[in-house]
Amino acid sequence: MNALLTSTEPDSMPISWVERIFDQMLLTYGKKFTDQWGGADPDKLIKFWCAGLAGYAGSEIKRGLSGLDVREWPPTLPEFKTMCRPSIDPLVAYYE
């Protein structure tokens, strides 16, 4: 791994978290995951996800990872963020 990526920007998610997310997606999707991201520079991709997931809590990341089981294809960053922080149905929220 690139030495520049051993630590992230102050507002970024730790690299080790994104590496674990990618490991989980690789195990879940196999070739679909490598085909989707095969043309991307791995260091840039990890850094992009670190910045994009800044401020997300561990519990939110776990929610996103648990949603991988019901998807046929690995999510993009915006899709994964939605999986981590799903929109709230106002009617359901009212009754809760």
Image (cartoon, rainbow, N blue to C red):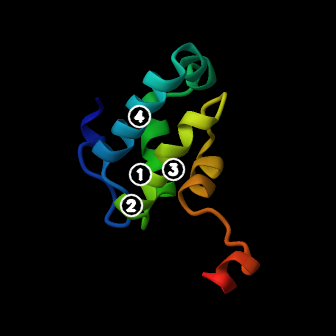
Q: How far across and how far down the image is residue 49, in percent?
A: 48, 47
Question: Which residue occupies the extreme front position in the image?
Answer: 95
Q: Amino acid at mark 4?
A: Asp
Which label sits in the foreground, 4 or 1?
A: 1
Residue 64, labelled with which disc?
Answer: 3
Q: CA distance from mark 2 to mark 4?
A: 25 Å
Q: Judge depth for marks 2 and 4 and give the one in front.
A: 2
Q: Which residue position is annotated with label 1?
A: 62
Marker disc for residue 43: 4
Circles 2 and 4 in contact, beta carbons < 8 Å = no
Residues tagged 2 and 1 counted as in contact (Cβ below 8 A): yes
**Crowdedness of circle 2 by 10 Å Cα count: few (<14), some, many (20+)?**
few
Earlier along the polypeptide chain: callout 4 or callout 3? 4
Horizontal side of 67 relative to 54 (left or right) equals right
Q: CA distance from mark 4 to mark 3?
A: 22 Å
Q: Circle 3 sits in a helix, a strand or a loop, which is it?
A: helix
Q: Nearer the viewer, residue 53 or 89?
A: 89
The x and y percentages for residue 39 are 59, 21
- Verify CB contact (< 8 Å) between mark 1 and mark 3: yes
| Left or right: residue 96 compared with residue 2 | right
Q: Residues within 10 Å of mark 3 (few under 14, many from 20)?
A: many
Mark found first going from the N terminus, 3 or 2 = 2
Residue ranking furthest to the right: 91
Q: CA distance from mark 2 to mark 1?
A: 5 Å
For badge 3, the amino acid type reads Gly
